[in-house]
Amino acid sequence: MRTKWSDLKRIIGEVRLTRDKYISLIREDGTILSANARMVRSLHLSNPKETALNLFDLLHPVNKSHFINRLNESDQKGTVSCVEAYLKNGLYHPMKWHISPVPSDGACRYYLCQGYKLLDENRTREFYRLGDYNYQLIFDSLDTGILFQDARGEIIAVNQKTAEILSSSLEDLYNLRRIALQWNKFWDIRNEQDQPVLFKNTSFNKALHTGQRQTEVLVIRLGNGEQRWLHMSSQPLFRDHSSIPFAVVSSITDLTLEKKLIRDLKERKAVLRSFMKQTPNMAWVVDEQASLLFASRNFYDFFGIEEEAAARKSLMELVPPAVAEALLEKHLRVLETGISEEIIQTIKWADGSDFVFHIDIFPIEGISGKKVLGGHAVNLSEKFNAEKKLRETNDRLLLLSRATSDAIWEWDMQTGQIFRNDALMDMIGYHTDKPKGLSWWLRRIHPEDRNRVGDAVKQSTEEGKQSWEGEYRFKCADGEYKHMRDKGYIVYENGLPVKMIGSIQDVSNIKELEKMLIEERLKRHKDVSELVIEAQEKERTQIGHELHDNVNQILSSAKLFFEMLEPDGDNQVLYQSKGLEYIHLAIEEIRKLSKELVAPRLLANDLIRCVKQLLDDTRLASTLEIIFEYTGEPDFLSNGKQVTLFRILQEQIKNIIKHSKAGKVQVNLESSPSEIRLTVIDNGIGFDANQTFRGIGLSNIFERVRYYNGNIKLDTAPGQGCSLIVTLPGVE
């Protein structure tokens, strides 16, 4: 062994100092190699060094296999395992053991076992006293929880099954104290009426005070949320010649599974009743004598039978003779063979009407070997009538297809045959003298369209759609392709597609017109772009004029003054001051021009803020009274549209200041997801609306409005002010 025996003896010696613990070193077969003095004295063992002893022999038979499993578990995991078991000391008493694997180089495995009693000395004496009255049987392998309590309710003895039922451990149960005072803290226990059960009302307490056996059903809610149903029977115990119980033994049976089965059974019965009530078909169950056990609501309603009056009566007595005659033979044959029967039966009613049924009769596994038959019938009368009408309709459709000029086709999806009328064949230029199936048609669809069309038809039928529609190019007899718009309606039977009926329209002319329209739109867009470019060039030219006529002249003046500067001249300070004055003037001109061209805050996509800033600056630089009102936030608007609106307002405000002689301006901005409208109204002198209305960048802005499919309305006349309304579409 890798661990020296001296080390093991040292460990055992240290544990020996703890008087309440048992410690032993055992082999994998249970042989005790060494044990501390506490264990030897308490269990009345001979010296394990002198006489071979086996720990497994000291365990209660019920716990032996469990203990060995934990032994193997600790060896496999290399960790300490805990196990609760009863150890024999005259009588068996409950103990908890800690098992530690000891490393070994040999084939044999060794374990260090440490254990301690779960009962204190007083309760140990009570425990042994129970043995005198033959209550040791509580620790036999019963599938029932056994619980011994003294007159105060304290636990004297409890078996492992009780701990399992209560989702606890023996240690936890033995450690419980003052149960009567802390009853509600340990468990949430209720009766079948979901009322809390107090300690004084427990079967234990009633048995103790009445001296009679007490039973009850309890519902315990465990800490993990699980709910368990328990049946508890409490029996008082008496000593010789005493009429006062000194203890109570209770048996605890777990009814949870039984309650669950009962609940499941009730739910299944409820589901069956609901099914029989809600199913649109007729269903029934009969015994060997064809007596009706139960049936669906539709069965009773169809035959006009009262459910209460039909109980245990013969099915043949309840249904009309025509139905009884049709069913009797089938029932007898299924009873004899045990093989299901499936038929489609037409039954003539007394009033002369015919009903068509799909009937299934099948054996059902009964109780105690009794033969039970089930029946199920689906009324197919409507379906048969519908199919008859469909056939009649198809006949009419055939006649109509021959008489109409529309291109009509019909595809039998089961046989693959396709019917095409003369109008369709004339459209594509082929003759009808030879049958032309689906493959013939698919081969003449343009290769780029073929897979798309086939996949679309397949998807429509797989998804149960009522129709299919598509466009494709088809090669006609003259070798040219025509654009076809094809639409088919799908006919289903029993959920499966069986037929498709449709029509074809030649849309080649429409496609040609669409092509021409697209080309026209492209041309228009090109023209608009050219106009925009032209307007931009005009703007650049105008900017150049502004720079040349204003800024360049100012800078030339500044240059003149600076050239006049001489080191010893008399007017050097004056020349320098004048030169700087012209430079500052040029800077202001450039700044003014830049501000007209750029809206820096518009980069933040905030039109309202930029408009407010523009109008605030205008108020400072002029005497205009400006009123600004707006509704909604145009945050949905693209940046290009926002810039267009800002430029228009900027240009219009500049024109009002320069030309209108207005004293008041009203600016409105109305925003909605569908459109945005800018209105600028002044009370100036107005002008002739027929004259050319120009300004820097204005023609460019008008083209951008048209590019966005917007609209500009100008309303003015001499002496009547001016109104400008710009409308742009919102979200496209």
Image: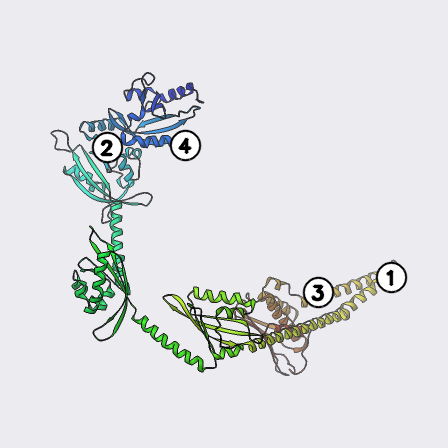
In the picture, the quarter occupied by the N terminus is top left
**Secondary structure beneath label 3:** helix
Q: Where does label 4 land, which residue?
A: 76
For marks 2 and 1, the one nearer the N-term is 2
In-front residue for pair 449/549: 449
Decide which of tag 4 and tag 2 comes sooner along the chain. Answer: 4
Instruction: Tell me the colour scheme of the image.
Output: rainbow
Q: In the rendering, at what x and y percent does residue 558 appear?
A: 80, 65
Q: Which residue is mark 3?
A: 591
Q: CA distance from mark 4 to mark 2?
A: 30 Å
Image location (x, y in percent) of residue 377: 27, 64
Q: Which residue is mark 1?
A: 570
**Is any part of residue 600 visible from this angle?**
yes
The image quarter in which residue 287 lies: bottom left
Does label 4 or label 3 sit earlier along the sequence? 4
What residue is rendered at 61% in x and 70% in y? 645
Judged from this view, the residue extending furthest toward the front is 433
Identify which amino acid the numbered label 2 is placed on.
Asp
Upstream in sequence: badge 1 or badge 4: 4
Please tell me how crowded label 1 is: few (under 14), some (14-19), or many (20+) other residues with Cα within 10 Å. Answer: few
Quadrant in which residue 481 is drawn: bottom right
Specify the label residue 140 is tagged with: 2
| Real-space CA distance between mark 3 and mark 2, rounded to the nearest whole angstrom | 104 Å
Q: With 236 as the anchor, is 531 left or right in this view?
A: right
- Determine whether the residue tagged by mark 2 lies in a helix, strand or loop: loop
Q: Residue 411: which numbered mark, if any?
A: none
